[in-house]
Amino acid sequence: MNEGPAAGPTAPRRVVLVTGLSGAGRASILHVLEDLGYEAVDNAPLPMIEELVTRGERPAAVGVDTRSRGFDPATLLHTLGRLKLNPALRPELVFAWADDSVLIRRYTETRRRHPMAPRGRVMDGIIAETKLLAPLRDAADLLLDTSDLAPPALRGRIESRYGGGEADLQGLTVSLISFGYPRGLPRDADLIFDARFLRNPHYDPMLRPGTGLDPAVAAYVAADASFEPFLEKVTDLLTLLLPRFVEEGKKYLGVAVGCTGGRHRSVYVVESLAARLAQQGPEGGPPWRVTVTHRELTRLARQAPEKTGAAGTAGDATHFTGPSEPEQARRPEGNS
């Protein structure tokens, strides 16, 4: 049985209030926290939250949204302020959000009605909820954009910040993201590398339909004379930076690699970086915990799974490397 994050005898008990836009992943975040050993309660009435978390003995996670009884952003912020005055507690507010187009797609896929527009358009509910929750978003300790965040990557973000045991000892999760420049830069990237100088498999008719996960495409990219020096120098830079980020207390680092389409070169570079980082780690510690997300492959899998090819499935588009890969990371789960 998971007893939750380890804590010393005088360590404040963690309390996580989880809120955000409907369909942005609030329930998924609560599930991860529950797996980590938190006592999770969803949609608790606002007047009961303070009593609920102060009487408990385990770390607590409370989900709150517009469906909660007595919901009011000002009341929730007042409750959060009172909890922060309690020296025995360490409360935080997590706010999940996503782009309007992503929320609309998620509602279309699930055929659910928006709680703030039960008889109207989903977009009307999103607009009203965004306006209502603006004060909570501004006050959040952790703001999570789940627009392009696959479930395993979302789990990694939560585990790296709120997990216990090995996650706390290691202290840092490295998220490697491949992307295509035409669709914009990943929002949560701290470091960005451009792989467009490598020769492009797109111009080979035999390789164009594949992805950087295919051996033939990988061999083509790796054969570029600049590939190995580039990979070595990026690895050396990360080897220098990662321990310093740990010293600063950083829990999450987003490293993005982009190319023109986000399907060939950047995918293979990210896979190669993940393999190298999974064999390294802080001095005297386990290998770095690494998550891999191929943003454009994930998009393709969502739009037309039958056209992505054997290598470009959603299961391949996001994965973990490094120690203690959670079983849940291999199971498909929604962000709703």
Image (cartoon, helix red, strand yellow):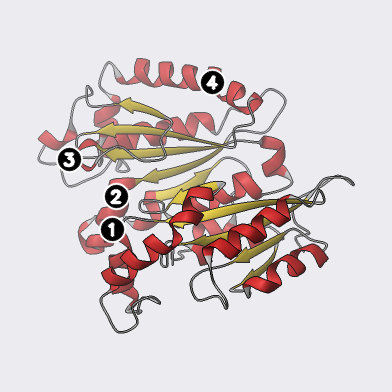
The reply to whether discs 1 and 3 touch (Cβ–Cβ < 8 Å) is no
Instruction: Tell me which numbered mark, 3 or 2, is placed earlier along the sequence.
Output: 3
Three-letter amino acid code of the residue under disc 3: Leu
Q: Rounded to the nearest whole Å, what is the CA distance between mark 4 and mark 3?
A: 35 Å
Instruction: Tell me which numbered mark, 4 or 3, is placed earlier along the sequence.
Output: 3
Q: Rounded to the nearest whole Å, what is the CA distance between mark 3 and mark 2?
A: 15 Å
* Disc 2 target residue: 297
* Disc 1 target residue: 301
Q: Quadrant of the N terminus?
A: bottom right
Task: Mark 4 vs mark 3: give the one in front.
Answer: 4
Residue displayed at 67% across by 72% down: 47
**With respect to residue 197, does 21 lie above or below?**
below
Residue 207 numbered mark, or none: 3
Task: Mark 3 vs mark 2: give the one in front.
Answer: 2
Does dot 3 land on a helix, a strand or a loop? Answer: loop
Horizontal side, residue 86 vs residue 122: left or right: right
* Quarter where residue 251 is shown: top right
* Disc 4 target residue: 241
Does dot 2 land on a helix, a strand or a loop? Answer: helix
Task: Mark 1 vs mark 3: give the one in front.
Answer: 1
Residue 220's spot in the image, x, y percent? Answer: 24, 30
User: Front-most of 228 and 112?
Assistant: 112
The reply to whether discs 2 and 1 touch (Cβ–Cβ < 8 Å) is yes
